[in-house]
Image: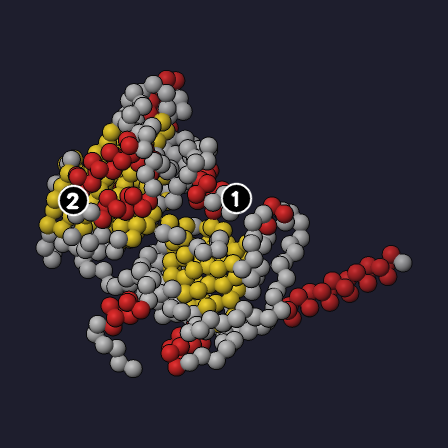
Amino acid sequence: MSQPPQGESESSSVNPTPIAHTALERPTQLAIAALTDVGLTRDNNEDAFLLWDLASDRSVESAFQIWGDDEGPALLAAVSDGMGGQQAGEVASGMALQSLCDHARHGFQESSSNGGPGFKAWMTEGVEEANRRVLAASQADPSKKGMGATLSAVAILEEGLTVAHVGDSRIYLLRHSRLRQLTMDQTRVQSLVAHGHITAEQARTHNERNLLLQAIGAREAVEVDAFDFRVGSGDRLLLCSDGLHGLVDDPELAEVLSSSTTPLDQCEALIGMAKAGGGYDNITVVVAHFG
Amino acid sequence: MSAKLVFLSGDLEGAVVSLLDQGFTIGRNPEEDLVLPDEVVSRLQASLRYRDGQYLIRDEASTNGTFVNDRRITEQVLHDGDIIEYGLGGPSARFEAEAPVQGAAEANDGGPVREAVEPATPPQPRAATAVFQTGDRASARPATGTGPADETAVKGFFRSIRARPRRPFVWAGLAAVLASLAIAIFLLID
């Protein structure tokens, strides 16, 4: 039977299943923005973000890039949620981001192909380096004993995107109005969900939901969740600390990300929603739109 | 426990795979037990295991990840109604468990697993779906005749499922060896 060219839209009216399995269209532009906020109840902000333009080798607050056929993006985005007494949490998150950034910059300059599959190793090593540095700093200074941080990072490169992740900050992908959580929380609660002891719904209010199984600076060895993936035109990416995803649920996140406002507007809207939900924690968001 | 995968998208859309309380592999590779011919799906994408009255899905280090209810997973217990996506943007299926499995893991902790009694009759096929069973006993035989509308799914599915080696013989052989050992020891002691 020959398939009419419009077959797909025709069948979608018969079958309500919202599956759009179409080839990805190569994105030609990127708009990205980030914001962090102390929230409503904390005195200091232990969260931090990183937006680093690898091509021009400098930090940026937001970016809008358009690229042609023979060029592509080269950007590093990350969020980190620090923990530890006094000012130690801020030190840990800042140090984690700095270590990763140093290593990724080095990797970008070393690799001839502007990233590519080999970049996963650079990102993983960067996170491991961050772990070593934070752990060494916490062991060297008694006032920083036990400090640690989460780290969720994505390298946006011509060849594709590479994620490296430790802890319970998250990276989400919105594609065709469907929000998927790309990172897995490295928490006790997530482990309970995976083993079927509690439901995902119960996990949201579980009293151990902040207990991390992996963190930057906690132990000598760190389990880095690293993977590559591709984005298409129209995709939207969200990186956030648990100050956002702990207070705003997925459908609400999807609604904001789907809106036709700018990444910066969406960052502001998301932080506003986290505050409306209580704002008990520091809130950090990075939003990227691929066009 | 009686469970099945109902495919919602991809080449197998509409197909129902009955699970017979045993593990199997899923991937693009023709060697896997359930073959999903989709470029998003890895050669070996995921595996399903049955343990203590529950089904576990595990991502086998796939390129595009395995998702349950839009969250990427490494290994996770499945619950009735869970939507599994094999690779980001790949084919998806709904996991349907007919018997409640709550508390099954705790009840059977450490002890021998008493499997839920299989229903005497196979699950009734729905209109416009084909029912298949994976595993030894029924290697990809549709349990019912299907109309012309389902023919693609049926053919696709015949290509998609490989019969597994018949394990009962292995077990029978093992039992025989153990029995003769026991008799030998008994005779020696005697």
Separation (CA) of disc 1 from disc 2: 40 Å
Disc 1 residue type (three-letter): His
**Marking on residue B94:** none
In percent of width and height, residue B62 lies at 38, 56
* Quarter location, residue B98: bottom right
* Quarter location, residue A268: top left
Q: Is residue B137 visible?
A: yes
| Residue depth check, mark 1 versus mark 2: number of the one nearer the observer | 2
Q: Please give the name of the residue rendered at 34% of the width and 18% of the height, measured from the top-left corner.
A: A86
The residue carrying pointer 1 sits among few (fewer than 14), some (14 to 19) or many (20 or more) residues within 10 Å by Cα, namely some
Question: Is residue A170 shown above or below A26?
Answer: above
User: What residue is shown with label 1?
Assistant: A197
Question: Is residue A191 shown above or below B128?
Answer: above
Q: Tag 1's secondary structure?
A: loop
In percent of width and height, residue B64 lies at 34, 56
Q: Tag 2's secondary structure?
A: loop
Disc 2 residue type (three-letter): Thr
Residue situated in front as seen by the camera: B131 or A33: B131
